Amino acid sequence: MWIKSQDGKRIVNTDNVTSIFLEYIHRGDALKHINILTDNPHHGGVFELGKYETESKAMEVLNRIYESITDKDSFFLMPEN
């Protein structure tokens, strides 16, 4: 499956990805935002797919990606925040 990043600057093939995960970004004690990231060891890096203001929204998107992968969809567009 292919995933187009939220900013439209990257398209990722999930066949080449080892994981898709959340990264929590804090400003002091407060949660600033949550990134959804993917790692691709074949291309040497971790790439941001999207950025969300709440954990519930980030988890909703992560679950939708999971469902799309398990349903064998061919494409997933990251939703806006």
Image: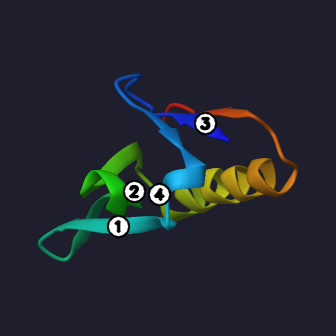
Residue occupying image coordinates x 50% and y 64%: 55
Q: Which amino acid does label 4 sit on?
A: Thr
As drawn, 45 above or below 72: below
Residue 2, image x, y percentages = 61, 36
Residue occupying image coordinates x 84% and y 46%: 72
User: Alpha-carbon distance for marks 1 and 4?
Assistant: 12 Å
Within 10 angstroms of label 3, few (less than 14), some, or many (20 or more) residues?
some
- Image marks 1 and 4: residues in contact by CB distance under 8 Å: no
Pointer 2 or 4: first along the chain: 2
Pointer 3 or 1: first along the chain: 3
Which structural element holds mark 4? loop
Q: Which amino acid does label 1 sit on?
A: Glu
Which structural element holds mark 1? strand
| Front in this rendered view, residue 48 or 29 | 48
- Could you say which disc has been placed on residue 23 in the image? 1
As drawn, 70 above or below 31: above
